[in-house]
Structures are given as structure tokens and as C-alpha cells.
Image: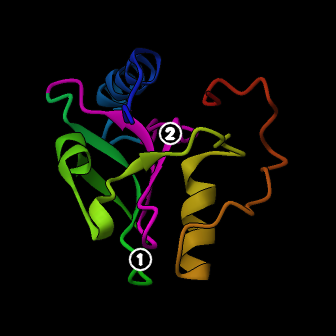
């Protein structure tokens, strides 16, 4: 399975370029996850919001390796693409994932649960017209 389509890659890069302009300031963006990756034979999950505009192989998002400590961080797309685990299975993209809110909402829920969960409640402060939404 192809992990990123041209459309997804374009959205991740657009978010990365926008974030690069304000990184380290109060204006940093809290993007909605663009894509969800997972390992079908384990508990590893990634919710990705952006790609580094200078090194497109570096993705940023909420990373959960299945050890109970999900955290915000970076992962290399090439590592996800080349990984082969049990039964020769690799990382897959969740074709049915639809973000319900900004990454911070998922991060808060994941820290509380000890894993990335999809049962986050959409933020009432955000409407579907919010510019951070996919």
C-alpha cells in the first residue's frame, strides 16, 4: 500500500510550510491530523499533521509505539515505508480515518488513555469551517 498519495503529501507539505513561518511563537498552528498510519500486527499508531518543508521525509505528529507513552514528535516516512514486522507486515494507512479535531485534542486524550484513541470529542470551540481542519 502506498502510504501517501500526492494529495496527502501536498497537504502535509502545505501545513509544514505554514508551521515553519511561525514555529517557536505563540502563533504556532494546531493542525488537524491529515493521515493515520498503523501497524496491523501491533499497537503502533501515528497521526500526522505536517511534513518538514526542507526534508520531506520528516513527518510530525502524535506518535504511539504501543508502549503506553504516546507523544508528539517526528518520524521518517522512509522508516515507516521500509518497516517489516511479524508475518512480513508493514505499516499501513487507515483509509477510513477522518480527524475529529486538532492534534492537541488527540494528544490530550492519548496521554490520558496511554494510547492514541479515536473516541475524542470534537472541540466545541471549533466549527467545521475552522481553517486548521483538513
Distance CA(mark 1)–CA(mark 2): 18 Å
Which residue is identified by label 2?
35
Judge the density around disc 1: few (<14), some (14-19), many (≥20) Cα neighbours within 10 Å: some
Q: Provide the residue designation for mark 1.
A: 66
> From the image, which quarter does the C terminus lie in?
top right
Left or right, 4 with respect to 29, comes to: left
Which residue range is magenta in the image?
Answer: 26-54
| Residue 113 position (above or below residue 84) | below
Q: Secondary structure at mark 1?
A: loop
Q: Quadrant of residue 63?
A: bottom left
Quarter of the N terminus within the rendering: top left
Q: Which label belongs to residue 40?
A: none
Residue 96, x across and y down, in percent? 66, 40
Query: In this rendering, is residue 30 above or below 64?
Result: above
Dot 2: element? strand
Total marks drawn?
A: 2
Amino acid at each position: 500500500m502506498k502510504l501517501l498519495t500526492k494529495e496527502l503529501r501536498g497537504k502535509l507539505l502545505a501545513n509544514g510550510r505554514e508551521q515553519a513561518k511561525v514555529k517557536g511563537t505563540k502563533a504556532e498552528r494546531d493542525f488537524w491530523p491529515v493521515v493515520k498510519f498503523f501497524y496491523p500486527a501491533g499497537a503502533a499508531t501515528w497521526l500526522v499533521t505536517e511534513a518538514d518543508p526542507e526534508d520531506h521525509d520528516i513527518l510530525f505528529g502524535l506518535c504511539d509505539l504501543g508502549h503506553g507513552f504516546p507523544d508528539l514528535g517526528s518520524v521518517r516516512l522512509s522508516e515507516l515505508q521500509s518497516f517489516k514486522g511479524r508475518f512480513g507486515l508493514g505499516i499501513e494507512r487507515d483509509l477510513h480515518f477522518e480527524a475529529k479535531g486538532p492534534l492537541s485534542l488527540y494528544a490530550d486524550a492519548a496521554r490520558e488513555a496511554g494510547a492514541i484513541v479515536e473516541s475524542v470529542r470534537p472541540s466545541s470551540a471549533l466549527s467545521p469551517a475552522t481553517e486548521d481542519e483538513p
